[in-house]
Amino acid sequence: MLLTPESPYAVDVRAAQKYGSVPGLPAWQADRYLDLLLPTPRPPELAPAVLYLHGGGWRAGERSTGMYPWLSPLLAAHGFVAANVSYRLSGQAPFPAQLYDVKAAVRWLRANAEAYGIDPERVGVWGDSAGGHLAALLGTTAGRADLEGDCGSAEWPSAVQAVVMRCAPSDFPTMPQENAEVLDALFGGPPSETAELRRLASPAEHVHVGVPPFLIVHGTRDEIVPFEQAETMVRALRAYEREVTFHVVDGGHHNLLENLDLPLGNDPWADLGLQALDFFRRTLGT
């Protein structure tokens, strides 16, 4: 059990829950997992669920990042069912494999909603950097048959009802060439060979009238994902009169700090966690 001070619930962690399997691969490579964090005792009403998607440039990182106290434990300690999700990295498969996996995780939560006290009509997602990009795609590509994928059951919808997108790209054709190595790995080739796939992977391309509320957080001095990427997504959402809250971190780099060499710490991430908690409470309820 985890216990967040001054929170209404303790947290029960159910590690390594299998949510899907990729066809054609041996089990040690095929199986996909998430860690589930449950508020305990179980809330009297069905709880909303929120998935956390880790960063790492689509080529590194792991779901354990979501165990930082200002991420999934914070939500679970306040009555949400939280899930930290693993997805295929670019060294394992190019895009859209990553999106296929996280959509399968959403469907798994809905398929197991009764067992874990989840309200299947209230599912949110958040992520940082690469995870924020995948979160944005979950919010903008619901119902796209060509992007549902090959991992997990297709019996349940993959739509989400709220999105927190932090430090994430939204329009790959305009990303700087300094990111070429990372992006070429994600898309399986250079821009000249993968232009359509890069457009398909751009959340700003998929905004439409049914997109859920967004909270977008970005630093003005982000040295990896330019601030203009966030502005592009905000403009796209507002063009369709979608609800979007835009939190600008003045002077913030990719780590959202003024010093790009500092590791992640409580400040400002603890406050951003509380901001996300308030956003999910408002959009999903608890």
Image: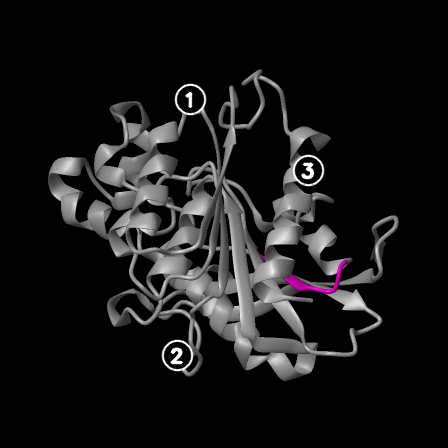
Identify residue for label 2: 154
- Going 85% across and 54% down the picture, which residue do you hit? 3
- Going 34% across and 50% down the picture, which residue do you hit? 237
C-alpha gap between disc 3 and disc 2: 37 Å
Q: Residue furthest left?
A: 192
Along the horizontal axis of the image, is 18 left or right of 157? Answer: right
Sequence-earlier tag: 2 or 1:
2
Amino acid identity at mark 1: Glu
Identify residue for label 3: 271
Along the horizontal axis of the image, is 149 left or right of 192? Answer: right
The residue tagged with tag 3: helix, strand or loop?
helix
Sequence-earlier tag: 1 or 3:
1
C-alpha gap between disc 1 and disc 3: 22 Å
Dot 1: within a 10 Å radius of its alpha carbon, few (fewer than 14), some, or many (20 or more) residues? some
Q: Position of residue 24 (x, y in %)?
A: 35, 69
Look at the image and tell me in which quarter the N terminus lies: bottom right
Marks 3 and 2: which is nearer the front? 3
Amino acid identity at mark 3: Asp
Q: Residue furthest front?
A: 241
Q: Is residue 32 above or below residue 168?
A: below
Sequence-earlier tag: 3 or 2:
2
Identify residue for label 1: 223
